[in-house]
């Protein structure tokens, strides 16, 4: 089984053609700006949107003591004691939802197959994302094999923050790796993501040695990596790899704010300002001078 929190059809912004993005739960990193905070925990997460709550009370009964009403406010035990799936579909106004469910390979393939004509027409396909897709178990390999049996193009977005032994089998299966390089400095990386940058950089070198083309994705984040020295260090590292066919710059935004509130989490990275396409031009021009094909994403 695979733990999925969203299957987004008809995406036009995440690679070639019309794509279906499959979002998997679970990530080894904890990036402070993460746009998909519901992806981080591997198990299903409770999301509550107070604006939609009509105090019907169905969740109080189903919650079995994990959800109580206190002074007119719903209090939720996020470390839900018991099976959180009992809350799925209990709320008539969908103020309370459970994000993430186990789905079989066959079930996912049945949903993907509906869009095969769009992939053929547009040169699109499927993008595995999350979270960290390669954190899933062996069923992920079966899913990719089933997609390839149907001649569907498969991209995978990855943090590369996993043992190489976990990543390596996918280099033969996935058509294009979209691999994140968020920083090259170990101290900054651990402070803002909780991870080990050496693991990521070594995995980039190993991925490069496979001879497969890959795309380097750089989230451009205020305070974290948005200075010229930090960004040029990222670009220089990428330019030294033989098979980095493209570098993508992805500007920070804080549109995930509501999701943090719904998860009962603090969003400590809000209001850090906007990064415009113009701000990224200087990095893009430097990368082109270093011989990289560049793209500024939305
Ligand atoms: S690697 Fe991506 S999914 Fe994981 S915490 Fe960072 S931004 Fe979120």
Image: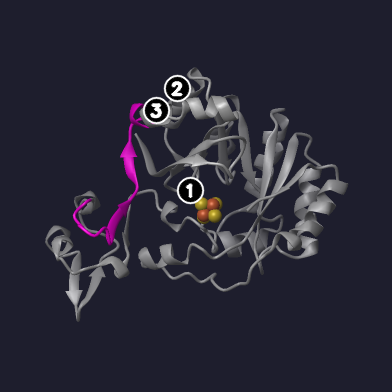
Taking the spot 36% from the left edge, 64% from the top edge, the residue there is 262
Which stretch did the figure color magenta? 89-109
- What whole-number distance in Å separates the C-alpha atoms at marks 2 and 1? 21 Å
Whether tag 2 and tag 1 are in contact, CB under 8 A, the answer is no
Quadrant including the N terminus: top left
In-front residue for pair 19/264: 19
- State the residue position of label 3: 109
Using the image, determine if residue 228 lies above or below residue 268.
above
Give the SS element for disc 2: helix
The colour scheme of the drawn protein is: one colour
Query: Does residue 245 show up?
Result: yes
Query: Does residue 29 show up?
Result: no
Would you call the spot at circle 2 few (<14 residues within 10 Å), some (14-19), or many (20 or more)?
Answer: some
- State the residue position of label 1: 131
The verdict on residue 284 being magenta is no
Residue 270's spot in the image, x, y percent? 54, 71
Using the image, determine if residue 223 lies above or below residue 217.
below
- State the residue position of label 2: 146
Taking the spot 79% from the left edge, 35% from the top edge, the residue there is 242
Q: Earlier in the sequence, mark 3 or mark 2?
A: 3
Using the image, determine if residue 119 lies above or below residue 14.
above
Whether tag 3 and tag 2 are in contact, CB under 8 A, the answer is yes
Q: Is mark 1 within 8 Å of ligand 1?
A: yes
Residue 92's spot in the image, x, y percent? 20, 57
- What whole-number distance in Å separates the C-alpha atoms at marks 3 and 2? 8 Å
Position of residue 151 in the picture relative to residue 282 (left or right): left
Position of residue 170 in the picture relative to residue 279 (left or right): left
């Amino acid at each position: 089984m695979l733990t999925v929190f969203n299957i987004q059809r008809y995406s036009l912004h995440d690679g070639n053609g019309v794509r279906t993005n499959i979002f998997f739960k679970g990530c080894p990193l904890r990036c402070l700006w993460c746009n998909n905070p519901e992806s981080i925990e591997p198990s299903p997460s409770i999301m509550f949107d107070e604006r939609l709550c009509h105090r019907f009370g169905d969740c109080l009964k189903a919650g079995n003591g994990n959800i109580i009403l206190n002074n007119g406010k719903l209090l939720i035990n996020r470390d839900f004691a018991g099976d959180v799936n009992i809350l799925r579909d209990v709320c008539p106004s969908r103020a309370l939802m459970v994000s993430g469910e186990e789905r079989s390979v066959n079930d996912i393939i049945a949903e993907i197959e509906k869009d095969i004509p769009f992939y053929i027409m547009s040169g699109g396909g499927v993008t595995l994302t999350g979270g960290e897709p390669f954190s899933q178990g062996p069923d992920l390999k079966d899913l990719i094999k089933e997609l390839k049996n149907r001649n569907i193009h498969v991209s995978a977005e990855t943090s590369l923050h996993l043992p190489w032994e976990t990543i390596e089998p996918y280099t033969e299966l996935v058509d294009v790796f979209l691999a994140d390089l968020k920083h090259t400095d170990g101290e900054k990386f651990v402070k803002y993501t909780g991870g080990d940058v050496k693991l990521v950089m070594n995995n980039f070198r190993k991925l490069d040695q496979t001879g497969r083309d890959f795309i380097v994705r750089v989230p451009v984040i205020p305070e974290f990596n948005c200075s010229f020295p930090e960004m040029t260090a990222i670009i220089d590292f990428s330019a030294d790899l033989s098979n980095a066919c493209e570098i993508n710059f992805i500007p920070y935004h804080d549109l995930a704010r509501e999701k943090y509130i719904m998860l009962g989490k603090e969003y400590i990275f809000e209001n850090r300002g906007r990064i415009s396409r113009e701000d990224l031009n200087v990095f893009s021009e430097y990368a082109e001078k270093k011989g990289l094909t560049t793209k500024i994403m939305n």
